[in-house]
Image: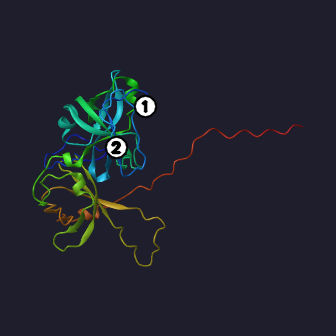
Amino acid sequence: MAFATANALSGVNAVMRVLSGRHNGTLGNVRAIRTTTSGRLARFFIAAAVDDESLAFDTESLVQSGAVVSAHGLKGEVRVMPFTDFVEERFFSPCTQYIEDQAQGRTMGGDYDKPPGTVSKVKIVAGREVTSKGRNECIVKIKGVNDRNASEALIGRRLYVLTSERPVLREEQVGDGDDEFYSSELEGMTVVLQETGERVGVVIDVFRGAGEHDLLKVSVPPLPTPEGEEAPAFQPDEHVFVPFVKDIVPTVDLARRVLEITPPTGLLDLRQKAQKPRRQKARGPPPPKKKQPVD
């Protein structure tokens, strides 16, 4: 199934599995890790550390598995939004994952897709599934997080697994829309028309659970300005959604990084424009009142 960051996790056709596959308390069994996106090594000071050896990862070596969205109860459990189809293996069974030392927050689009800063190794002890506001989430116990303060300190932080630890989905480098792929494999691929080879755009996201099939969000160039008209000062990005099924996506060539499509008539005309980001107004105390002149 396709994966969408912040994206709904239920009601999905099983044609494809696309995966990502304030600190007040104590967090045990943690090892500080450094990614190459940050030159600063952040550490958790813990009562029983496994190892404090420093390691360095490039960002391609880490894949998001979920994000902590809230604390749960008083015994240190956290509520996790999963970004993987291997939920049982990642959050219901004991395993090792990596968590951000500091929450990086969401992007302007509301997604958890900012690059990580520094991450630390944690042990997932156990978990269970819950449904909240139509979303399937996980209640997870992390070893060493034993009270409400410690679990609240993790809100907003993302969890990762190593890319090398993801299951192998297939041996072949060429497939189609009925095969299984990781979202990171599809994102960034060039989309072309199979019949003519004409370039359509680039896959920028993968959405799951949208109707019966997963959807590829494909960035497309804006249409040319009609002759005689002045080009607008702001030209928003445009995109189309392409169902990820074999009839429309007959070829996915990972080696060439090319995805060939045979869209039905009118599909590529259903363009959508990105919303222009709004500037947030600075909030602060009101300005001091002017003193009234004295007669």
Amino acid type of disc 1?
His
Disc on res. 54: 2
Q: Using the image as rendered, state which of residue 55 and residue 61 is in the foreground.
A: 55
Query: Which-is-in-front pick, marks 2 and 1?
Result: 2
The residue under label 2 is which amino acid type? Ser
Please tell me which residue lies in front, 106 or 28.
28
User: How many residues crowd around disc 2 within 10 Å: few (fewer than 14), some, or many (20 or more)?
Assistant: few
Quadrant location of the C terminus in the rendered image: top right
In terms of depth relative to the viewer, which is nearer, 213 or 39?
39
Q: Position of 274 compared to 29: left or right?
A: right
Furthest residue in direction top, as rendered: 74
Residue sitting farthest toward the left: 171
Residue 130 located left or right of residue 195: right
Residue 23 is tagged as: 1
Q: Residue at x 43, y 46 (%)?
A: 40
Question: x, y (%) of residue 139?
Answer: 27, 29
The answer to whether one can see residue 160 in this image is yes
Packing grade of label 1 (10 A; few <14, some 14-19, many >=20) is some
Task: State the SS at label 2.
Answer: loop
